[in-house]
Every structure is written in C-alpha cells, then in structure tokens.
Image (cartoon, grey):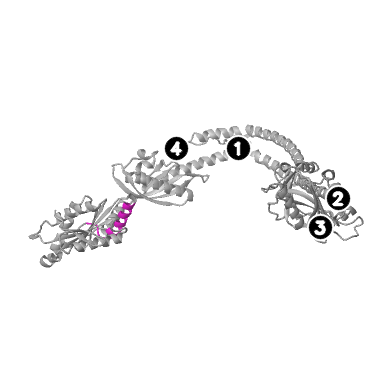
Amino acid sequence: MTLRKRLFWLFAPLLLLALGFAYLLSQSLILSRFDRQDAALLDAEAKRLQALLDHNLKRNLDLVLSYAKWDDTYDFMRGQHPDYVRRNMDPEALQQINFDFMLLLDEQDRVQAEQWMPPDLPDMITLGSERPRDYRSLRDAIVEQIRRLHQPGREDLRGQIVVVQGVPLVLAMGGISNNQDSLPSLGTLVAGHFIDGERSELLQSQVNGSLRLLPPDVDHDGWRALPTLGTANLNRIEISPRRVLDENRQQLDLLFRNSLGEPQLLMELTRERRLYQEGRKAISIFLAEATGVGLIAWVLIYLGLEFGIMRRVSRMHRDISAIGPDSNHQRIRDSGNDELGSLSQEVNRMLERLEQSETRDREILDAIQDGYFELDHDGHITAINRALCGMLGYSEEELLGNSFEALMEQEDLERAVDQLTRAHQTGDNVRFVAPLQRRDGSRGHYETRFSIIHDGQNTFAGYRGIMRDISDQVAYQNRLLDMAYTDPLTGLHNRKAFTEQLPLALEKTRRSGDQLALIYLDLDRFKEVNDRFGHDIGDLLLQGIAERLRGAMRQPDQVYRLGGDEFTLIVAGGNAEVAQRVALRLLATLKQPMQIEQQVIDFVTPSIGIALYPEHADDAESLVKAADSAMYEAKRERGRACLYRPQRLSSSRQSG
C-alpha cells in the first residue's frame, strides 16, 4: 500500500472507533433495554397462556361439577335411573359442552357408565414416537391413567393436562354427590377432550406468538416454577429460561407436570422481538447519518494531506526507488529543514552504514573456513561464501539462483525438506548430514546446520546454513564399522554380523513368502594342522578356505566365519535341492588339496549341515540349532553334507 493510501486510511480507525463506540453504546443502553422489554413481553405471554389454560380447565370443571353434584347422577350410582346415560350422556350433549368422553367411576375406580366421541385418529395430535394403535387401546390407557391420578379424599375440584400414548388431552374430575353436596361421595365423574388440530389452532389464535406442542424430552435444569393461579389446575407448570433464536425471534418452553409430578408435555412459545427490531432500525439510521458526516471529514483531510505532504513524499519515494545494489553512493536529494528533510538526512546516513556493513559482512564470510549459504522460501540459493565454492568445486555463478535439490539424491532430498519444514514450524536450529554432489562428479559428506531468516517485520524470509566437510570423519567411521563386523583373519563377516543379519534375512524371506537355507560348515582334522605345522600355517589355511568359499558363492557377502574352523552360509531363496547343490559344490571345492608354503595339506575335509526356513524352523535361534545338529550328524562320517530331519537325521554321502 502506498503512503498516500496509508495517510488516506489513517482517519479510518478514528472513524471506525467513533462509530464502534456509538454502536456499542447503543447496544448496551438502547438495544439491551429493548431486549429486556421483549423478554418481559414473552414472559407475560407465557403467563397469559397459563391463564387461558386455567380458564379452560375452570370451565370444564364447572361443567363436570354440574353433572357430578346432581341428584340424578347420585341416584344412578345408587342403582336408580337406568336410562341416565341415554338421557344425559348422549353424543350430542357431550358435543354441546365440548367434551370428547365422560366416565362414571365407583369408589373402587370401576367404570359404571361411559360415553366416547373421540375425533378421528389421523386428526389427533401425537407427541414423540408413540402412537395409539386403535380407539380401544387408547380408551383403556386413559382409564388406567385416570386410576393412577385419582387420589382418595380429593374428589372435589381437579383438572389437568395429561398425555396418553402420545396424545395430549384435558381431564376434569369431580366427586359424585347430591345437589347440596351433603351426602358422602359414591365415586368420581371424569370428562375431558383431546387436544386435536382444531383445538390446537384455537389455542394458537388466542396467543400472541407461535405455539408448538412437544414431548418433554429436554433438560429442565435452571427452569422456574410458575405460581398456581387457582385451585382448578392440578398441573405444575415450569418455565424455561428465554432463548434468543436470532435477531427476530425469541423463545421459551412451558413444561406441564401431572398431579404425580410426571412430565407430560412441552409447550414451545415463540414470539417476535419487535421492540428490538425497531431499536435496530433507529440505530441503523443514526449510524448511517454519522457515517456520512465522517466520510465528508475524511475527504477534507485527504485533500489537505495531498497538497500539503504527499507531493514531496512522492519525490522522496522516486529517489529511494532508484537506489539499488549497483547504485553505490546514490542518495536522496531532499534537503528541507522540516521533519521530511531530517528524514532524508537520516536515510542517507543509514545507506552509508549499510554499505559499510555489507562490505564487512562479505569480508568476514569469505574469511571463515566453513561454507555459508542462504536459501529463499523455495530452496533457491541466494548467497554463498568463498569456502562453500571451494568445498563443492562450483563457481559462485553456477550456484546462485539454482535450487539445492540439484546437489542431492532423492532420498536425502526428502530428509532435507523434512528438516527445513521442522525448522520453519518450530523455529529451532536443525542439524542435517548428507552426501552432496561435487562438480567433479564425486560425492562428499557434509554436516549442515540450518536456522530461520526473518525480515525486518519478523516474517519468514528463508534459511541460512553453515556447512562443514566431514568426508574424512565419515570414511573413518565406516572403516570402524567394517572392522566391527569383519573377521580380521579371513576378511569374512564375523559372528556379530551373522547374529544381526540372519533375523533380517528371515524377515525379508517371510514378507516375500520365499525360502531360505542355512549351511553350517566345520573343518574336520583342522586341529592336526595347528599341532603338526603350527598356528601360522593354520591361519593361512583358514584364509585359503575363506577365499575358496567366496569363490564358490554367488553372493560372497553371505559367508560368515563364526570362529575357529566354523563357517556358515546364508542361501536366500534356497530350497532343499538348491541347498544340496551348494553343499556339493562346497564339498568339491574344499576337498581339493591346498599347498601352503612348502606344505601340501590334503587331509582336511568339511562337514556340512543344512537347515531350511520355514520347513525346519521359523526363527533364527531354532534354525541355527537345526543346522548345527545336521552338521554334527555329518561329522560322524566326515566329509559329507547332511540335511536336517525333525525326527531323525537322514544322511547320505554326497559325491561331486
């Protein structure tokens, strides 16, 4: 972004701060007040809904009591007026008083008379997954629920909303007595109606908001109980905390419990946040007007900056842009006596110090013995010193601008990328050792330590590294490693190498599903050579045996001397036939007389034991024991090869 734009946008934070402060102030003072008023209206609407339900229950109870506290009803329960049901509980009468059913229960809660006029099953509202199978099952479930809710000694005013088989309904109950309510109760009269679609819509029309009936399957923590408005309603009603759905809607729930305290249904009441919306509109108009005033002031400030400062700054910018790596001693020409002039002088002095620093850094880097380099984000070389060129044999022009990938093999390159990525992510210095390609085609081993380069804004800018040639050290370590795994007398691999490489060979064979043969070889009568001719001749004989073994094997690196006159051979992919052919070739080779100095030795013969994987053993230790056992079986007659047999060692003299 140019300085002109920066100065132009300088006023933006102040304008945004003022508008933001006004917005927050309006939110905290005005909108919060409107929101509280909306919450109060929602709470009042919930209480009004409670009052509506209480009023309906009171009306139902009055109707129920008009039947229950009636001499005809009392006489019917005493066995008189057999036509009571026909005259007083016919469907037309129930429909006129808005009841879907009426039941007369005696003191033992047995049904003495009943009348049902329920709506069609599809018209009933059901909550949750439960549905009534038919009218009969629904009727039996309602009667059972009435018996559960009936409390002896409370046959007077009682009404509540319950849910049976997922169907919400309103019950009203009263004790049966005479007109003066002076005689003892003979039972209970129960009437009610289902909350079907039509009644639900009627209730919705009386509420200032959206109303939904739901099953009570929510967490009720933090809910508060609404105070009871009268004695008609036995439901305990709990109200949830208000929920703000979005900028336009708010919501709360009313939980209805029956007289036993069991949750029955949930009424979800949703209402618009009308006052909040009107407040937002008023605040939007105010902020729009304030923004317009701020923009006008913004333009006036920009014009002042343009004609008072920016033209001079533009000239300084052109002078600074013209300064590059090849423009030594070029300076800014502004010489004013104000702040911009002082800035120009400081920039000129900084350029002088920078030129001196770059010259000094270059001299230091060229004087050190270790190689130094820098890489950009993409791994291209951007800076090197003289020592690095000498290590690799390349000129500065051949390295600068090229990627370091050209100096490495693919396997080493992947490790290098991983190390650079780790350095970038953690910020730690990392150490990396790998061979690099020299200009003459040879490969040398180098140790490199990477670190991260950050620019003046502390932003990642690339990598720098110090490189040291460790080729001689790596070669020395390799020689030590070879000595640890090589028999010094014969030059073959030793027992340590065999112990480590046999399990690896078995694992490789297991993965490939192939076979492997292990050959154990022991020299018969070797002790006589040491006793008759001395240990020097014995050592020379062992060296000659080792040379013949190397010559007889396609892979001489799989021949091992375990110590003394014992040797072992690993034959990869060797089945019984292949192993026996190898053993015959070894017998034929090693039985030939050997002349050492002035002595001809023709009495030393080999005994060979063979074990197969996985036929004879499935691990290294067992395979070694099997081959060793076969070798001792071969030594009984000397100069032969014996294949291991699990039950008995089968031996046959082998001939070349």
Q: CA distance from mark 1 to mark 3?
A: 91 Å
Q: Which residue is mark 1?
A: 6
The location of residue 642, given as percent across then percent down, is 20, 59
Task: Mark 1 or mark 2: name the one nearer the start of the chain.
Answer: 1
Mark 4–mark 2 contact, CB under 8 Å?
Answer: no
Question: Can residue 139 be spotted in the picture?
Answer: yes
Task: Mark 3 or mark 2: name the one nearer the start of the chain.
Answer: 2
Q: Which residue is mark 4?
A: 325
Q: Quadrant of residue 492?
A: bottom left
Task: Mark 4 or mark 1: name the one nearer the start of the chain.
Answer: 1
Task: Mark 1 or mark 3: name the one nearer the start of the chain.
Answer: 1
The residue type indicated by label 4 comes to Pro
Q: Which residue is mark 3?
A: 106
Check disc 4 and report its element: helix, strand or loop.
loop
Give the prevailing secondary structure in the magenta stretch: helix
Mark 3–mark 2 contact, CB under 8 Å?
Answer: no
Q: Nearer the viewer, mark 1 or mark 2?
A: 2
In the image, residue 506 lies in the stretch drawn in magenta: yes
Between 502 and 206, the one nearer to me in the picture: 206
Q: Which residues are magenta?
A: 492-510
Badge 1 density bin: few <14, some 14–19, many ≥20, Cα 10 Å:
few
The residue type indicated by label 1 comes to Arg
Check disc 2 and report its element: helix, strand or loop.
helix
Q: Nearer the viewer, mark 3 or mark 4?
A: 3
Task: Mark 3 or mark 4: name the one nearer the start of the chain.
Answer: 3
Q: Quadrant of residue 505?
A: bottom left
The residue type indicated by label 3 comes to Asp
The location of residue 240, given as percent across then percent down, is 73, 52
Q: Which residue is mark 2?
A: 84
Between 293 and 365, the one nearer to me in the picture: 293
Q: Nearer the viewer, mark 4 or mark 1?
A: 1
